[in-house]
Image (spheres, helix red, strand yellow):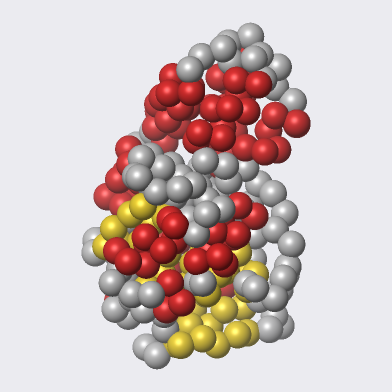
Amino acid sequence: MMPVITRPLPKAVLWDLDGTLVDSDPLWTAAERECVIAHGGTWTDSVADPLAGAALTTCARVLREAGVLLPDEAIIHELVNSVVRKYGDSVPWVPGAVELLTALRDAGVPSVLVTGSPHALADRVIEAAPAGAFVGCVTGDDDVRDKPDPEPYERGASLAGVKPGECLAFEDSPTGLAAAVAAGTQAVTVKAHARTVVPDADDHLTIGALADVQVHADRLELSTGE
């Protein structure tokens, strides 16, 4: 049996989007690869690796270095449009995401999306989420510094009307985790769909999947370990 950690209900939950709440990392990887190849560049692991959890501005720089000879804005526009098309008619929720969002909402815990993705994708996810689950979002379009800076998570907590230390933050990448920890949130990494390995450490909890979180009237139970 996996160890179970009990925590009081947080005042709010802050969610990373890609790879944490929605299984969109494969869509981003495909879009990035297609962009590089379409513009005569070379796609290798050394190109793919730094893209995991990276801000769109970073993605544009990496793709330019891989041979995509376009301005950053044009690269970002192409990537976002490609991912929106790949979403199709439904949001590819990570298993357990909808159930956890619903349970948090029913327990009176608001959620805020904190993502480097643009509003076009964040709004799509919020619209598809259980009604009333989200009270706001911080996106790559907003005037905030990119993760790993703590500002996105500080802004997310502010949107929920609470302090970062009163929030639980779910992440799946080293970059996002660094932002959540620096902001002072109660950070939790979700391993199930991560594109990169996030080392275990004392400054955050690690769970295998969102299904490992159980919401009760006065507490959360998180099953940690493999």
Quadrant location, the N terminus:
bottom right
Viewer-side residue, 116 vs 217: 116
State how many labels appear.
0
Q: In this view, which residue lies farthest toward the bottom?
A: 218
Residue at (70, 17) in percent of width and height: 42
Quadrant in the picture for residue 188: bottom right
Query: Which residue is at a point 42% across and 36% down the rendered structure image?
Result: 87
Q: Position of residue 171 (x, y in %)?
A: 55, 59
Residue drawn at (57%, 79%) of the image: 222
Residue at image location 50% in from the left, 35% down from the top: 56
Q: Up-down: is 84 above or below 209? A: above
Residue 3 visible, this angle: yes
Q: Quadrant of the C terminus?
A: bottom right
Q: Is residue 208 left or right of residue 21?
A: right
**Relative height, residue 135 to residue 147 (above, below):** below
Q: Picture coordinates of residue 111 (x, y %)?
A: 35, 66
In the image, residue 4 lies at what x, y percent?
62, 84
Residue with the most extreme left position: 132
- The vertical placement of 117 against 130, above or below, is above
Residue furthest to the top in view is: 40
- Quadrant in which residue 198 is drawn: bottom right
Q: Can residue 27 be seen here?
A: no
Q: Is residue 133 left or right of residue 19?
A: left
**Residue 123 position (above or below residue 110):** above
Q: Nearer the viewer, residue 122 or 85?
A: 122
Residue 73 appears at what percent x and percent y? 43, 23
In which image quadrant can residue 172 be found?
bottom right
